[in-house]
Image (spheres, helix red, strand yellow):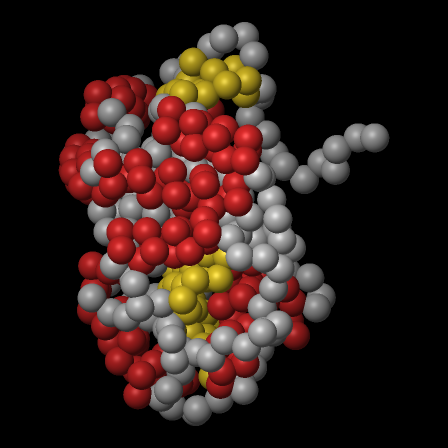
Amino acid sequence: MKLFDVYPMLNMTVERARGERVFDDTGKSYLDLYGGHAVISIGHSHPHYVERLENQLHKIGFYSNAVHNQLQAALANHLGKLAAVDQYHLFLSNSGAEANENALKMASYHTGKATFIAFRKSFHGRTSAALGLTDNPRLQTPFSGSIPVEWHDLNHIASVEESLAKGDKAAVIIEGIQGVGGIHVPTDDFLRELSACCKKYNTPLILDEIQSGAGRTGHFFAFQSSGIEPDIITSAKGLGNGFPIGATLIHPKFEAKHGLLGTTFGGNHLACAAALAVLEVIEQEDLMTKAKAHGDYIMEKLRTLPHVEEVRGKGLMVGIQLDQAVAPLRKQLFEQHHMLTGNSSDPNVIRLLPPLNVQKESLDQFADVLNHLLQS
Ligand SMILES: Cc1ncc(COP(=O)(O)O)c(C=O)c1O
């Protein structure tokens, strides 16, 4: 059987990885400034992560949600404290799209309404409702249109308020920082206004922190710089450092009922062990502080390079907006300098999402190489 060919791929077969480095099958080493779409938070194969998963596997890897699982409770407890979101209730699934799908369902159950507000350039995943609220016509199916949605521009509150005032909205969903769309940051003021409007019109606010969360921006969740309290928060990617996990954090005002949400694999023992290891390393190695410091440092440096129009982001979620297409540059970075970077739906934006413990020297090396390529 052949593989279903849906992924445009780099010419590389990855064999192993450690920290910020990925090695191909010929032993060549690459600097990973992308973390496999923001997934690698604490670095590849972190020794504590490997040990915790290995130990867990010797005890039990999986049992269903029909029995108590102490690791879920431990994860809820640790996440609540480290991320300062102790007041929420945790529902675990397997991916970002699922975390969002469950958030959208909860909002719709709660309000009894079906129409959502989403933002232009958004990406929320590839399941039905998440896809319906993703601003990319190329990905839509004929049935995606069955999710009623009103689109708005990021950082413009007036039209959002007008739309909320109609009183027919199930929820507003917004990324902590838009990732796939090219690193667009909602301002703290906008988030505060949005939160106030949602409260005024009794509409749940869902913060999609799937790419921007897990400590990447210096806060555990990017929105936390604004001080708001969303109704639902979603997380995935960096939370498992490569082990699939999705998390929907639900405000206690939403009532849980047996059977309301469910999953076979979500919250299994291995996934919880992986996420606990991630939280432990983030805490022990103070990775949120490091992400913020190194992110501020590299963004300042990148702003001085030629052909750079704008550098956007927070912490180690960085978008470099150039005055030209980035594809040839990314090819050179990969082939000649062995550096992995990300693209976005904007062809002129390079996306950086390195592990939170990426070394300052490696970021310097990247800036030097990029400078050199942009001069030539
Ligand atoms: C902001 C955001 N939400 C949701 C998703 C979907 O996550 P997953 O691919 O784990 O389903 C992504 C993936 O890129 C994302 O960036």
Question: Is residue 207 visible in this depiction of the protein?
Answer: yes
Between 152 and 20, the residue placed more toward the observer is: 20
Question: In which quadrant of the rendered image does the C terminus lie?
Answer: top left
Residue 87 lies, with reference to residue 77, above or below; the image says below
Give the vertical position of 164 relative to 315 (above or below).
Answer: below
User: Where residue 59 sits: x, y (%)?
Assistant: 54, 35
Please indicate whether residue 237 sits to the left or right of residue 140 in the image: left
Residue 62 falls left or right of residue 165 = right
Instruction: Please tell me whether residue 210 is drawn above or below residue 275 in the rendered image.
Output: below
- Seen as rendered, the residue at the extreme bottom is 166
Q: Nearer the viewer, residue 251 or 57?
A: 57
Q: Residue shown at 31%/83% (left/top)?
A: 199
Quarter of image, res 185: bottom left
Measuring 52% from the left and 15% from the top, which residue is drawn there? 24
Which of these two is toward me, 103 or 12? 103
Does the rendering let one see residue 152? no
> Where does the image place residue 186, in percent across and percent down from the top left?
29, 62
Q: Residue shown at 21%/21% (left/top)?
A: 361
- The percent position of residue 104, horizontal first and vertical second, equals 52, 71
